[in-house]
Amino acid sequence: MELLDLHSTVDMLRASDRILVLGHVQPDGDCLGSMTALALGMKLLGKSVALWADEPVPAKYRFLAAEFATPRPDLLKEFDLVVAVDTSTFARIGADVSLAAAGLPVLAIDHHPVVETRFTYLYADDTQAAVGCMMYDILRELDVPLSPAIADALYAAILTDTGCFTYKNTARRSFEIVLALIDAGVDTADIASTVYNSAPAAQLRLLRAALDTLEFVRAGRGAYMYLSREMQEQEGAAEADTENFVNHVRAVREVEVACMVTAMPDNGRLRISLRSKRPEVDVSALAAQFGGGGHACASGARVDEPLKTFLPKFRARLETFIDELPPL
Amino acid sequence: MELLDLHSTVDMLRASDRILVLGHVQPDGDCLGSMTALALGMKLLGKSVALWADEPVPAKYRFLAAEFATPRPDLLKEFDLVVAVDTSTFARIGADVSLAAAGLPVLAIDHHPVVETRFTYLYADDTQAAVGCMMYDILRELDVPLSPAIADALYAAILTDTGCFTYKNTARRSFEIVLALIDAGVDTADIASTVYNSAPAAQLRLLRAALDTLEFVRAGRGAYMYLSREMQEQEGAAEADTENFVNHVRAVREVEVACMVTAMPDNGRLRISLRSKRPEVDVSALAAQFGGGGHACASGARVDEPLKTFLPKFRARLETFIDELPPL
């Protein structure tokens, strides 16, 4: 794997004519917004671009001006570069195609800490609030004009990955880029309302159901809630976005480690979401115990195990993790 | 009442030596942050300043570097100017003292639409996202250095009144000011975490209880939930901040008018919180039916009536309000 910087990344994109853009599984706003901005930018440069995703785009992100197509392995040979956005984990690429078999170079553009070396090229910068910020730099460097659709996509990326500018990753630079995006035509309130005020009513019923399961451990320093498949089936939870429920747990004053365990409606696999309030409480270490990873203050994992047997194990691990935290 | 602009406001502050700063009842982040910034700024100019508030400062705002004292009517004669922050309604001033009897001039600084004329002076600008933005301009115009404590207070004001930069009021100017505040030393994530991650655990139990009462009207175009005093007593809700619960209702896709009715724990009076997603759905008109007011997308009222008899009336008014909305 070759590590790239901004300039060599830009050179590689400039030298490629047929680009396949991929994201990660369960794509979020940063992933989809950054994919969209890159694809639209490459098209403005006259390149041929496709975006592939295994999963349908969540309703709240369907305003993004890009078409996400179902992967077509038979078409892989048409591309000369694959760009994987917002993941530095090969296994989390959100299109289940054998890139290795196709012999295509894969360039990952990501802001997570680097955890593996299976990409052909990697441009990673974990000081960036969002891949959207990196895409902004890339497109500027490529002299791509910031069309309103590109600006909207970048704003959605930055807004969501900074938690509306509240997370630790939010930098001065994030706000500087926002000013440039506003000048390019972004209606910030409109995008926020589209992303955050598009929930199905079932999402509130699910939140209530999740809150019913809230448990505190170790004098409230840790807390978790869960959603079973049954709860989701009962509430008619299609399209409900439960990804941010864990933030309610984090909102409690005493809580240092906030957790949410969600049985995915499609396959029953468990999604573990972990949040902390300060980098010294590095929840990526807890996530790693379940084969996951992420940032110090926001990590996750996927586990293939029934909820019922997993929860007591998880609780024990959480308690031990808190017991071993360094003193404040 | 004399209307002032930025320059005449600044002249008046410069000419005053002993300033009493007041806010509004149930003070929010914009009110308390703007009061703090003004008071600290005036002190840096060598003036004598006091901040009075009838109510204790909510825990999440206690980081603000100002002392909010209990009103002392006997000391009123010591001041030569009263500044009322974040309200253009005389009756909502958050210190129950007879300013008229004291014969003191009262200058209101506010970003709400003007609804009355009982102040001596009014500097109002309803295009501003927060009074915090107006205070920023005032302090800059006065050549007050942006101390870290002033910058923190202004950031708290802007962050909370823009709903983390998601509301319609959020302007390019809001982000420009944020850059200046960051340069003055604000740790944006730290303040966001203090404000939003300091909830008592009871707040989540209350949210669950409120979600249990959620009702939709008119095919989901309107929705409301409520909190009774009994629910709050049962959950041990002291210190819980329920002000933002209404945003959960607004988050639902179909909802155009989101409402929350809260019986205040101390006196049982009802707080009506109303939100819409676009200025064309002007909920201040609905609030006015209950003697309240505010902005087009965020308004409120206080009602002195038992919850049980009020709710059916409220529902009927809400239904009529929705029926009479202009088509989209």
Image (cartoon, coloured by chain):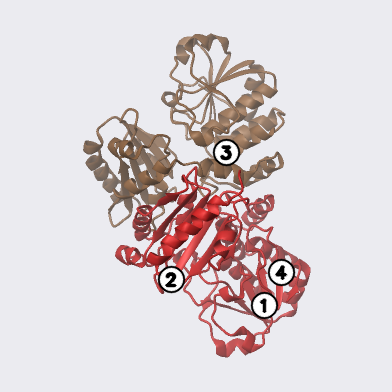
Chain colours: A red, B brown
Dot placed on the residue nearer the N-terminal end, 2 or 1? 1
Locate residue B227 relative to residue A167 in the image: left or right. left
| Three-letter amino acid code at the position of disc 2 | Glu
Of the two numbered discs 1 and 3 in the rendering, the one whose residue sits closer to the viewer: 1
Q: Are the two marked residues, 2 and 1, in contact with CB atoms closer than 8 angstroms?
A: no
Q: What whole-number distance in Å separates the C-alpha atoms at marks 2 and 1? A: 27 Å
Q: Is circle 2 on the same chain as circle 1?
A: yes
Q: Is there any visible trace of residue B249 in the rendered image?
A: yes
| Three-letter amino acid code at the position of disc 1 | Arg
Of the two numbered discs 2 and 1 in the rendering, the one whose residue sits closer to the viewer: 2
Label 3: how many residues lie within 10 Å, few (<14), some (14-19) or many (20+)?
Answer: many
Q: Which mark is residue A305?
A: 2
User: Residue B22: x, y in percent?
Assistant: 52, 23
Label 2: how many residues lie within 10 Å, few (<14), some (14-19) or many (20+)?
Answer: few
Q: Is circle 4 on the same chain as circle 2?
A: yes
Quadrant housing the C terminus of chain B: bottom left
User: Residue B68: x, y in percent?
Assistant: 53, 24
- Residue at mark 4: chain: A
Q: Is circle 1 on the same chain as circle 3?
A: no
Q: Which residue is mark 3?
A: B156
